[in-house]
Image (cartoon, rainbow, N blue to C red):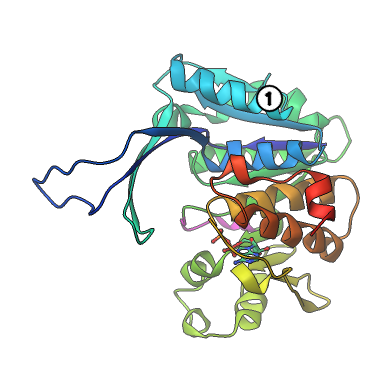
Amino acid sequence: DLLVVGSANADLVIGVDRRPGAGETVLGSDLAVHPGGKGANQAVAAARLGARTALLARVGDDDYGRLLLDSQAKAGVDTVGVLVGGAPTGVALITVDPSGDNSIVVSQGANARLTPEDVRAAASLLAAARVVSLQLEIPLETVAEVVRAAGAGFGGRPGPRVVLNPSPTAPLPTDVLAACDPLVVNEHEARFLLSDAPVGSSDDPEEWADALLSRGPRSVVVTLGAEGALVADGDRTVLVPSPAVTAVDTTGAGDAFTGALAWRLGVGDDLPTAVRFAVRVGAAAVTRAGAQASFPSTEEVAAL
Ligand code: ADP
């Protein structure tokens, strides 16, 4: 039902008393290695909910690549589309201080080598999907090729619906923006995309949602952390509140939200219904530490 096309990274995390400045060495905690990357996170989030999910991504022929393949397989993701080799697996080097502030260096590695050609070679995966979910931790030309192929359809059948979370932020080509149904942004991403207009400095998320919708996507979802999410589909703009939970760690909440949303759209929910489910998944994910480790099962979502 769902195809995620995106990044897979190993997150290498060290706790420090103080993050080092230029030329400085600090001693930190034991190293923790976690599977991550927005694409890998979204796929695991959906599969853990019971979604039939495949991942199109690229990892290195190395231990981190095998860690990522393993975590996908354990969650039940179809990994036939996870390509191996061409560069080392993508890595995020993360230092976290006691206040929770972090400094992160990302080596894109194999993620930067996921090419439009790889997308064309995976046409059968795209043709089989009802929804394809994208983010921007892979080359923009690769994202654009997915959008083109989805728009062209397969043998007279329409291609998958496109969901895009434009993170990390980048200017979006008009045709990519126009294909999004929905474009999923948090506050930071909304403000970035609207930074050329006065509304970008507004404090009213409804204004962002309406302004983003006027840029061409078929629908827009603005996630608002503990507040929930705004849905704008042209007919109306509605706030879907999040259940109140005690937040422990918000890492990966946006990925859990988007993975869940994309899956529910793929099985036929309308957009507000899918968002009502996704805010519960996002809320459940913030009640536990970690990214993929925090993603809930359907039973845990129902218990909220
Ligand atoms: P991102 O993680 O991309 O910055 P948000 O912070 O908007 O995105 O979170 C995405 C979703 O996760 C929200 O729409 C909400 O459903 C859920 N969420 C995040 N933080 C909280 C929180 N403190 N309480 C409840 N739900 C939350």
Q: What residue is at 66 percent from the left and 30 percent from the top? A: 55
- Report if residue 176 lies within the magenta region: yes
Q: Farthest residue to the right: give it.
A: 268
Task: Please state the quadrant of the image where ligand 1 appears.
Answer: bottom right
Left or right of 170? Residue 207 is right
Q: Nearer the viewer, residue 48 or 165?
A: 48
Q: What residue is at 68 percent from the left and 18 percent from the top? A: 80
Q: Which segment did they paint magenta?
A: 169-177
Q: How many marks?
A: 1
For residue 162, say whether it is visible.
Answer: yes
- Report if residue 56 lies within the magenta region: no
Left or right of 77? Residue 294 is left
Q: Farthest residue to the left: give it.
A: 23
Q: Disc 1 beta carbon < 8 A from ligand 1?
A: no
Examine the rendered structure and indicate whether residue 105 appears above or below residue 103. above
Q: Quadrant of the C terminus?
A: bottom right
Q: Which residue is mark 1?
A: 74
The image position of residue 102, as x and y in percent, is 34, 54
Left or right of 175? Residue 273 is right
